[in-house]
Amino acid sequence: MTIALVGGAVALAPAATAVGQSACRSDFYYLPGVINTNSVNLRSGPGTSYSSKGLLSKGTRLTWICYKPGTATTSSWDYVKIKSGVHKGTYGWVSARYNDPD
């Protein structure tokens, strides 16, 4: 839960909860991919407001399942299953800019 001070009063905002492939706005692809840079967050939902499930290293292999397109001010997000490394078998979301086809 996030606490925010609004005009002298305390307002409580719920924390972002995990979101699976139900947030996808595309067909399902199941294509191989790879992380293209170091220290990429694997997130519980499609955005930076969602919690990190851990960091992925450059070269981490994954299966790209589907994606949520971005807008003029936000990035696209890929829903993936990690295929290598310490998070192998974990599902989560990665900003599309850090995922390349394999």
Image (cartoon, helix red, strand yellow):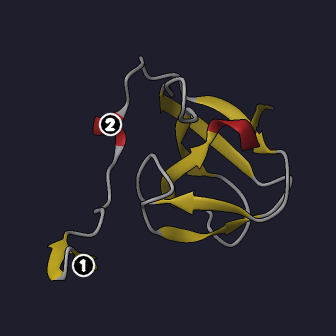
Q: Quadrant of residue 72?
A: top right
Q: Nearer the viewer, residue 59 or 75?
A: 75
Q: Where 7 falls versus 80 (above or below)?
A: below
Q: Nearer the viewer, residue 56 or 82?
A: 56
SS at mark 2 in the image? helix
Specify which label sits upstream in the sequence, 2 or 1. 1
Can residue 89 be seen?
A: no
Given the image, on which type of amino acid does mark 1 rest? Met
Q: Residue at x 54, y 32 (%)?
A: 73
Q: Nearer the viewer, residue 88 or 101?
A: 101
Q: Where 62 falls versus 18 (above or below)?
A: above
User: Residue pushed farthest top?
Assistant: 27
Q: Residues within 10 Å of mark 2 (few under 14, many from 20)?
A: some
Q: Quadrant of residue 25?
A: top left
Q: Position of residue 24 (x, y in %)?
A: 37, 31
Q: Nearer the viewer, residue 25 or 102?
A: 25
Q: Residue at x 15, y 75 (%)?
A: 11
Q: Position of residue 55 (x, y in %)?
A: 68, 69
On residue 1, the disc is: 1
On residue 23, the disc is: 2
Q: Position of residue 93 (x, y in %)?
A: 51, 49
SS at mark 1 in the image? loop
